[in-house]
Amino acid sequence: MAPTREMSLETKERIVKLLEEGNPSRMVAKDVGCSQSAVSKIWTKYKQHGMVVKAKRTGRPRKTSKRQDKQLKEVGVNVCDRTVRNRLKEMGFQYRKAKRKPALTPKHKRTRLQWAKERQSWTVDDWMKVVFSDESRICIGQGDDAGTFVWCRSSEIYEEACLKKTTKFPQSLMIWGCMSGKGTGEMTVVNSSINAQVYIDILDSFLIPSIEQMFGDDEIIFQDDNASCHRAKTVKAFLEERHIQSMSWPANSPDLNPIENLWWRLKKMVHKKGPTSKADLATAIKESWHQIDAEYCLSLIKSMPHRLKAVIKAKVLREPD
């Protein structure tokens, strides 16, 4: 049997990141292309050492000394590009696609920090009472925003099997949905632009039944973002009439909403069904929505304390001693 290839440090770090975000080990293993047991071993070592454990070095012998490494930064040394990449990796640099993140103003940062601190004592049981909601647009052919990677020779880059086909104006549908730690609630395709009255109709037809189905007569907290139609006076009056407590929400904070992770999974599932028309897309969305299990939703809710800690920690790291 051929020896197994040692997993890269970058892959291990991605595994830890996905697990910290609340993703189940089965999904993480499929995402990075390894076994569930490998994911479990990496997670166990991470908890034991508090860091991703780097494997014992193998491969070609080192070509530069520590002194020459310093010279690489100062005056330059005649070495190949692979050696330069290796030295950069040893210094903690990684070559990766830049992450997309909403631009945050100082006011946004202060609001996020205050919001996180006000809820840092919340337990998972507290977050289980929250119904998260959002709208999202799903396009035909949209399934992997990170890009599709293929193995091919330089002469094969335009071969049919090596291409990811795109369309200039892909067909798409806007949807509204909600979720909690108990599972997914109702979801609907929205066929018009959303104003305050349309949003009230959505809440009346889909949020209310979701709350009744998941919580019965128990009190809940409803989360939505700060879109203008969400914050209209008529919407606020509707929620008050139904005795639904609304959660304040910091602007530009999709990273704090676990339903964003659910959208990511839903789009992947829809993409695999290969819809080619709007009718097919609507059917694929509805089928995929009902296939999202409650266990996955629970794992997302369990990640909420970690999300808040990350916001607080990020601020603390920036403050002077």
Image (spheres, grey):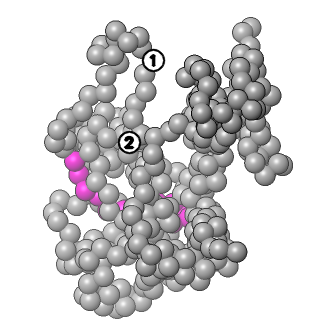
Quick check: 35 left or right of 48? left
Real-space Cα separation, disc 2 to disc 1, in angstroms: 19 Å
- Residue 182 pos. (x, y %): 55, 64
Of labels 2 and 1, earlier in sequence is: 2
Q: Would you say the magenta stretch is mainly helix, strand or loop?
A: strand
User: The magenta stretch spans which residues?
Assistant: 172-185
The residue at the far right in this view is 48
Corner quadrant of residue 253: bottom left
Find disc 2 in the rendering and name its residue.
Answer: 145
Q: Is residue 183 magenta?
A: yes
Quick check: 9 left or right of 311? right
Quadrant (top left, top right, bottom left, bottom right) of the C terminus: bottom right
Q: At label 1, which amino acid type do we have?
A: Trp
Corner quadrant of residue 226: bottom left
Q: Which labelled disc corresponds to residue 151?
A: 1
Q: Residue at x 61, y 80 (%)?
A: 117
The residue at the far front in this view is 75
Residue 275, visible in the rendered structure = yes
Quick check: 77 left or right of 221? right
Q: Residue at x 78, y 52 (%)?
A: 50
Q: Is residue 194 magenta?
A: no
